[in-house]
Image: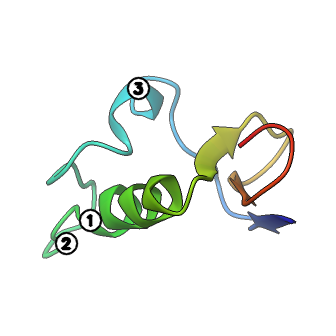
Amino acid sequence: AVLEVEDDGPGIPPGDTPQIFEPFFTTREGGTGLGLHVSRTIATSLGGRLELVPSAHGALFRLTLGGAGS
């Protein structure tokens, strides 16, 4: 199964992309920086993947569970 979620916001600055799944990395005031880290950890523990996919606009995340590509 593949689930993609995309928004139409400004996207993620290229300088931030290597760090977005790191624990405690946040650009939001008052943010904990754990959401993407915990989400990726859960996906991995289920044999899947959570990844940021290049997009022409906004941010696009792909969750892949089971089958090829996990």
The image shows a total of numbered marks equal to: 3
Residue at position x 15%, y 70% in the image: 32
Determine the CA span between mark 1 and mark 2.
5 Å
**SS label for mark 1:** loop
Of residues 41 and 59, the one drawn nearer to the viewer in this rendering = 41
Going by the numbered disc 3, the residue's amino acid type is Pro
Secondary structure under tag 3 reads helix
Q: Residues within 10 Å of mark 3 (few under 14, many from 20)?
A: few
The image quarter containing residue 55 is: top right
Residue 8 position within the rendered picture, expressed as x and y whole percent measured from the top left: 78, 65
Q: Which sits earlier in the primary sequence, circle 2 or circle 3?
A: 3
Front tag of 3 and 1: 3
CB-based contact (under 8 Å), mark 2 and mark 3: no
47 sits to left or right of 70 = left
Viewer-nearest of labels 2 and 3? 3
User: Contact (CB < 8 A) between labels 3 and 1?
Assistant: no
Question: Badge 3 is on which residue?
Answer: 18
Q: Position of residue 2 (x, y in %)?
A: 85, 62
Left or right for 61, reference 46:
right
Task: Work out which quarter of the rendered image holds the N terminus and state it.
Answer: bottom right
How far across and how far down the image is residue 22, in percent? 26, 42
Residues packed near mark 2 inside 10 Å, few (<14), some (14 to 19) or many (20 plus) = few
The reply, left or right, for residue 37 in relation to residue 1 is: left
- Few, some or many C-alpha atoms within 10 Å of disc 1 (few <14, some 14-19, many ≥20)? few
Q: CA distance from mark 2 to mark 3?
A: 18 Å
Look at the numbered discs 1 and 2 and tell me whether their residues touch, using CB distance below 8 Å. yes
Disc 1 residue type (three-letter): Arg
Report the quarter where the C terminus lies. top right
Residue shown at 24% from the left, 55% from the top: 26
From the image, tell me which residue sits under label 1.
28
Q: Residue tagged by mark 2?
A: 31
Circle nearer the N terminus (3, 1): 3
